[in-house]
Image (cartoon, grey):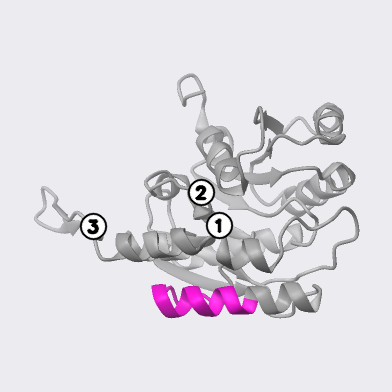
Amino acid sequence: MGDAGRDISLVDVSVVVPVKDEADNVLPLIREIAAALDGVRPFEIVYVDDGSTDGTPEKLAAARDEYPMLRVMRHQGCFGQSQAIQTGVRHAAAPLIATLDGDGQNDPADIPALLQRFDGEGGSADALLMIAGWRAKRKDTWLKRISSKVANAVRGTLLGDATPDTGCGLKVFPRAMFLAFPGFDHMHRFMPALTIRAGGRVVSVEVNHRPRERGQSKYGLFNRLWVGIVDLFGVMWLNRRPNRVRIAADDGKETQ
């Protein structure tokens, strides 16, 4: 699906939520997203089902009857969280994207604050700016906390992305900036580094983090660090080859 025939002026922000086997979390989270953004600014919710094998598709179909701003994309198979986010952003109608995980641990009530910070930092549809959530007080098992701490330390040291929590699903950024990123598996873990590579800025904002109440985590130490090691070196290679084109406008001023 392309952009032809869609009036993107109807919504200001698209909330993209990747899910796999999160049937019990679908309706509660959609209700929270809708409540958080109601009256704040025009929005849509874009769920991307990454080949769920539980009741997630049925729950999403039922939710569409209750929430007309909900749109659903479904992968015919499991292609990973990064691909799910890419699918959601490509099909989003708004120029501004907010993402969060579908497990209910990210708090949708934080989205308006991230949007406000984006505006306060001079954000616009063509800005090179990302507002990244920072789970300063994580409500996870000790294994998840230590694995994420190790992964963030390794990435921060090797990439210099100056982001304390690259794995937080809560982020706000322009759709156009994201679509210019190189696409690869696990790229969602490196979005701050890719923003900086493009010449942009990343601002981290503390957000709430909640215990998982329903469903099971699909990530542990192995797939938080070692699975992405090849991608880490790939991003290091990309960083040595930045793609920043400067154009002289008609008035003689430089623009990106």
What range is drawn magenta here?
149-163
**Which residue is label 3 attached to?**
244
**Looking at the image, is mark 1 or mark 3 earlier in the sequence?**
1
| Labels 1, 3: front one | 3
- Residue shown at 77% from the left, 46% from the top: 34
- Residue type of the residue flagged with mark 3: Arg
- Residue shown at 56% from the left, 65% from the top: 226
Q: Residue 62: x, y in percent?
A: 87, 29
Is 233 situated above or below 44? below
**Looking at the image, is mark 2 or mark 1 earlier in the sequence?**
1
Name the element at disc 2.
loop
187 vs 44, nearest the viewer = 187
- Residue shown at 72% from the left, 77% from the top: 145
> Marks 2 and 1, how far apart in space?
20 Å
> Marks 2 and 3, how far apart in space?
23 Å
- Residue type of the residue flagged with mark 2: Asp
Is there any visible trace of residue 137 in the rendered image?
yes
